[in-house]
Amino acid sequence: MRTRLLPLLIVLMAAVLLALGVPLAVSTASAQQQKVVVDRIDDTARFAALAQFVTDAPTTARPMRTDDRLETLRRELASYYGVYGIRAGVFYRNASSMANAPDDWVLPKTGEVREAFGEALLSRRSHDPQQVWPWQRSRLIVASPVIRDGDVVAVVVTDSPTGPMRSRTLRGWLLIGAGEIAAMLLAVGAALRLTGWVLRPVRVLDATTHAIASGRLKSRVAAAGGPPELRRLARSFNEMADNVEDVLEQQRAFVADASHQLRNPLSALLLRIELLALELPEGNEEIASVQTEGKRLAQVLDDLLDLALAEHAEADLMLIDVGRLAQERVAAWAPAATAKGVRLTGDCPPATGWADPITLSSALDAVIDNAVKFTPEGGAVEVSVAADGDMRTVVVTDTGPGLTDEELVRVGDRFWRSGRHQNVKGSGLGLSITRALLAAGGGAIAYEHHEQDEQRGLRVTVSVPRSG
């Protein structure tokens, strides 16, 4: 969730910073150019004031007469060009030069300079030049009219290089960019803290939910920070977990009490049936059937009691040699397998795992018992121990009839037995007890098809954690 929330916050903050930074950068560039334009306007106004007193505008037939004022204007323009590198000139209405610097600069016939000259002839200052950006090598053209007796007699034109202005603009942009980056870093840090603060209760809630789903019903959400809504959710979750635990405890107590209370009258009933059988002829089928069903009912009650205890038992976990324990269970079941004509083998190298040895032994007994029970004579049951990431696995495969896809989904459910095996002794609770015992210690049991040599059997995998 954090990987989705954090990029969203970063994108939003980046958009806000860009929305503020871009106008600021444009304003900085405009301010730098406006400052240069104002300076050029002041310069052209000063040169126009000097040019007003230069008399005798030339005609095409008579050259211009020079005087002291004209020489002063020329010296000012030359000095201006020498100091600032800005070309400047005063041009008569016919575009001939009154004074200019450098001396070889003439008024072009077309282009931006000519357009500014034409606007100034109309007795108004030229329009402000277009915005110049740092990556453009443009020049700033400013033209002002020289007016005498209400008439435009000449035009002052300045042609400024934009390198210094563009450098200042770029420096301003770099400062803005540095500020944006610093603000973005602060925003990312704040977003990290914010998402951590918001999602901390969610992570705690997720871990507690996983713990409860794994069988640790005593787990609760610890008091943590975060928004009030999430703290309220944590309290509600704890209340729900308490209620669920109470309901499960009541269910367990009911099953345990019912199983215990039923066993005493059932035992008395079986005893009376035994006494009654002594009064009847030997081999009476009805009495034998009643005795069989009574013993089956007693086994179901015992298994129910074991299941109720298993679902709420605290596992006594320790580091054990899973391979050695599996090999012991293979040796213990070997006589039963041999008596049925089933070949039971084990490949159990040393492998340490974190488990309750009694629980794991009971689980392996239930799985190997089922494998031997349902494998026909001449078949084989194999037990192997291996490592699978953070888990140690004991895999039991057989060459029995296996299960269909529908049956594979239901295997391990309480009281469930395959319709093809109803005549086989059992209560349908053994694998349910095994699953509950393993879950209490962080283990698991899984079932899948096993295909080998055109025979279809069952593959059961018992897993326990590699470490605590």
Image: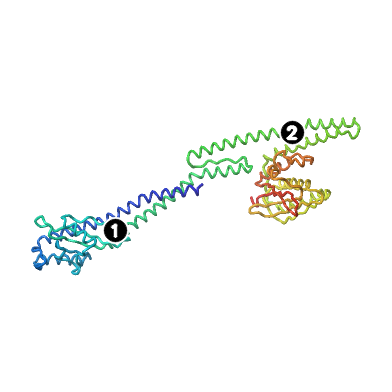
Q: Where is residue 143 shown, x and y percent of the image?
A: 19, 59
| Mark 2 vs mark 1: in front | 1
Residue 132 badge: 1
Vertical arrangement, residue 406 with respect to residue 174, above or below: above
- Relative placement, left or right, of 270 versus 130 is right
Badge 1 crowding class, 10 Å Cα cut-off, few under 14, some 14 to 19, many 20 or more, is some
Q: Which element type, helix, strand or loop, lies under badge 1?
A: loop
Among numbered discs 2 and 1, the one appearing first in the sequence: 1
Residue under the point 41% across and 52% down: 184
Q: Residue furthest right?
A: 281
List the residue tagged with mark 2: 260
Confirm or deny contact between disc 2 and disc 1 (CB under 8 A): no
Three-letter code for the amino acid on which mark 1 is drawn: Val
| Color theme of the render | rainbow
Question: Toward the viewer: 41 or 115?
Answer: 115
Residue 200 badge: none
What is the CA distance from the residue labelled 2 to the residue labelled 1?
Answer: 95 Å
Badge 2 crowding class, 10 Å Cα cut-off, few under 14, some 14 to 19, many 20 or more, is some
Q: Where is residue 147 shown, x and y percent of the image?
A: 12, 57
- Relative placement, left or right, of 177 versus 313 is left
Q: Where is residue 293 shown, x and y percent of the image?
A: 80, 34
Question: Toward the viewer: 171 or 416?
Answer: 416
Question: Toward the viewer: 325 or 10?
Answer: 10
Vertical arrangement, residue 137 with respect to residue 183, above or below: below
- Relative placement, left or right, of 212 versus 143 is right
Q: Which element type, helix, strand or loop, lies under badge 2?
A: helix
Three-letter code for the amino acid on which mark 2 is drawn: His
In this rendering, the count of numbered labels is 2
Residue under the point 63% across and 44% down: 214
Residue under the point 18% across and 69% down: 103
Q: Where is residue 440 shown, x and y percent of the image?
A: 66, 44
